[in-house]
Amino acid sequence: IKIKITNIDIPVAFASAFEGEIIRRKDMQVEFDGSRVDCAELVQTCDASEVEDHKITVVGPEVDDMELGSKNSIAYVVKVAGKNMQPDFEPVIERKFHNYINCIEGVYHTGQRDMQRIRISIDAFNAGFKIKHIGEVLYASVKNEFDAVVDKCEVVIYTDPAECTRVRHEVAIPIFDKRDERLDTLTDESVDVYYSCILCQAFSPSHVCVVTPERLGLCGAVSWLDAKATHQLDPNGPCQVITKERPIDENLGSYEDVDEAVQKFSQGALEHVTLYSIMQDPMTSCGCFECICGIEPFSNGVVIANREYAGMTPLGMTFPEMASMTGGGVQTPGFMGHGKHFISSKKFMKAEGGIERIVWMPKELKEFVAERLNKTAQELYGIENFTDMIGDETVAEDPETLVAFLTEKGHPALGMDPMM
Ligand code: SF4
Ligand code: ZN
């Protein structure tokens, strides 16, 4: 990861040394949390005439106006123009915001798209750090790193809650959806190469994502198209080509080429990784998975929980408890971090029988994936409205109640082989 230390006009330090810094609740002045209120981060390609270079605008309250310890909305739109700029590069630039904002002393960032979370420390606030300084950092970093494609850059930061709601729902989400739809026509079989991503090694030194058309990065923010664009923009950067010429087992999704790549990019920490199994050499997880799936032995199935879900799962674990077993760049068979869009993929734990294994999801997540998941279940198994067979927190938070529900619905997992 290349982060040059630049002269950015902010009252605290900016350096990659601060990237791993964590800000605890008691040390925080304010936070912004996309899993609880409307937030978004977005890069938009504009015509040169629509962008005023280095203009930073804050629409809404500044940090001074926010209560100590409060949770707030934030949405920033980075408008860029350049003759070599392509809309394909937008998500790649967006994904770097995580690194840029983390390099600020006393500021912490996690997540992406409309699910980012930012904390500003009391120390940074006392030093005079303000919302507009996030704009200064984004401006300088984007101009610095993407100078090959970005000629002009302007940042608009919304903290007004109504504006954040508008930007998230009317501007950002439709753009995110459109990007996801572009991928729908691609399959793992239809492409010649996959890509690695090691953007998260700042936090998880041995973690490598293998990104394929049907399996996006576990953060949900790096699709195969994004990884391809990242590689185009920076051929020596975090995303490298992985060939797929020497398959070992197509059902597991194992390849000699993939094994060699993960060995190299994990500095020898990983030897074998499969693309389609959660039991045999599953892909590792860093910390920014959108979801975690974990084996549920009573039903022969898996439970999936998403980051926003605050309640209990039938595994007797909450999302943070599942996360503590899953993260850190290690392989934990039976548990795996993944992106939301992977849930409706035909490659989702294909080696163990695929999406038929899904027995429980939080209601909100189930609704989010329903249309795509039901379409996949229809195509693969001829099951109509598959999500009606899947439990959620309104049905069961313990295995006994869940199994009773699944039995009543005739859920296919009950008749499958045990996973272990
Ligand atoms: Fe890249 Fe994976 Fe990190 Fe996403 S989670 S940024 S795909 S390494
Ligand atoms: Zn990560």
Image (cartoon, grey):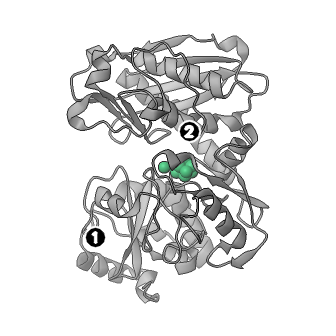
Residue 155, image quadrant: top right
Q: Residue at x 26, y 24 (%)?
A: 122
Callout 2 amino acid? Arg
Q: Residue at x 61, y 35 (%)?
A: 2
* Residue 165 position within the rendered picture, expressed as x and y whole percent measured from the top left: 41, 30
Q: Is residue 346 left or right of residue 236?
A: left
Q: Tell me the residue that label 1 is attached to.
A: 314
The disc at residue 401 is none
Give 271 or 172, whichever is nearer the viewer: 271
Residue 60, image quadrant: top left
Is residue 210 visible in this depiction of the protein? yes
Q: Is residue 29 left or right of residue 136?
A: left
* Residue 153 position within the rendered picture, expressed as x and y whole percent measured from the top left: 63, 18
Q: Disc 1 to disc 2, how far (Cα)? A: 33 Å
Is label 1 in contact with label 2 (beta carbons under 8 Å)? no
Specify whether tag 2 is near ligand 1 (CB below 8 Å).
Answer: yes
Callout 1 amino acid? Pro
Q: Earlier in the sequence, mark 1 or mark 2?
A: 2
Give 366 or 3, whichever is nearer the viewer: 3
Q: Tell me the residue that label 2 is attached to.
A: 95
417 is higher (above) or lower (below) than 367: below
Say what secondary structure mark 2 lies in.
helix
Classed neighbour count for the residue bearing mark 1: other residues with Cα under 10 Å, few (<14), some (14–19), many (≥20): many
Q: Where, quadrant-wise, is the N terminus in this rendering?
A: top right
Q: Residue at x 46, y 76 (%)?
A: 357
Give 248 or 391, whichever is nearer the viewer: 248
Q: Where, quadrant-wise, is the C terminus in this rendering?
A: bottom left
184 is higher (above) or lower (below) than 10: below
